[in-house]
Image (tube, grey):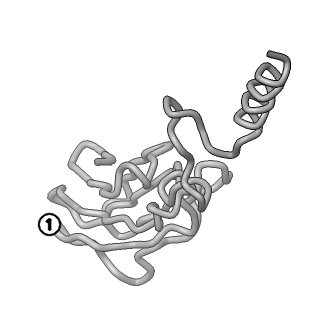
């Protein structure tokens, strides 16, 4: 009986040291976290669409952790009513936006996550993230 007990105790100890997860626990992929969990799915690409009736002369955006809106992304260009333009942010995550219209009026949008909201829409009333 002692041999049987020692054999059973050894089998239990060996099973406890196994690298395999128990049947009721999900197995972790061999490569570590998924691409989405690492943020690889967010490349910082976003589309700015002017759905307003006025021209936009400047578009600024930068990571929300920064103290400024960054540089004018349109440069010498203009975003006319109904036009869209694609941009790539310097980093993923939350960003702050400012647009300047032809009449120098501005609208701001704070902490828009460009990984979950890939479209920024300018309206006659402000800016929205979608």
Quarter holding residue 125:
top left
Query: 77 or 117: nearer the eye?
Result: 117
Q: Which residue is mark 1?
A: 82
Q: Residue at x 70, y 35 (%)?
A: 15
6 sits left or right of 39 in the view: right
Q: Is residue 66 left or right of residue 123?
A: right
Horizontal and vertical percent position of residue 50: 23, 62
* Quadrant housing the N terminus: top right
> SS class of the residue under badge 1?
loop
> Relative to the observer, which residue lies in front, 71 or 118?
118
Residue lying furthest bottom: 76
Q: Is residue 76 shown left or right of residue 33?
A: left
Q: Residues within 10 Å of mark 1 (few under 14, many from 20)?
A: few
Q: Position of residue 94 (x, y in %)?
A: 52, 48
Can residue 22 be seen from the camera position used here? yes
Give x and y (percent) for residue 85.
29, 73
Judge by depth and name the residue closer to the eye, 10 or 93: 10
Identify which residue is drawn at 80% across, 31% down. 10
Q: Residue at x 30, y 76 (%)?
A: 78
Whether 98 is drawn above or below 45: the answer is above
Residue that appears at 44% across and 62% down:
41
Residue occupying the far front of the picture: 1
Residue 102 visible from this viewpoint = no
**Would residue 84 be found to the left or right of residue 1 on screen?**
left
Residue 19 lies, with reference to residue 80, above or below; the image says above
Q: In the rendering, at what x and y percent does residue 75 appear?
A: 45, 80
Q: Quadrant of residue 81?
A: bottom left
Query: Depth check: 127 or 10 in front?
Result: 10
> Measured along the vertical axis of the image, is residue 12 above or below residue 68?
above
- Give the number of callouts: 1
């Amino acid at each position: 009986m002692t041999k049987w007990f020692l054999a059973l105790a050894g089998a239990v100890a060996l099973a406890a040291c196994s690298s395999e997860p128990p049947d009721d626990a999900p197995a972790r992929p061999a490569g570590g976290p998924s691409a989405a969990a690492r943020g690889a799915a967010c490349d910082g690409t976003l589309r700015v669409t002017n759905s307003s009736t006025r021209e936009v002369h400047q578009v600024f955006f930068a990571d929300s952790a920064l103290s400024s809106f960054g540089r004018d992304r349109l440069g010498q260009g203009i975003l006319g009513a109904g036009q869209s333009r694609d941009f790539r942010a310097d980093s993923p995550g939350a960003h702050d936006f400012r647009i300047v219209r032809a009449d120098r009026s501005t609208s701001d949008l704070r902490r828009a996550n460009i990984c979950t909201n890939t479209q920024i829409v300018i309206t006659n009333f402000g800016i929205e993230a979608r």
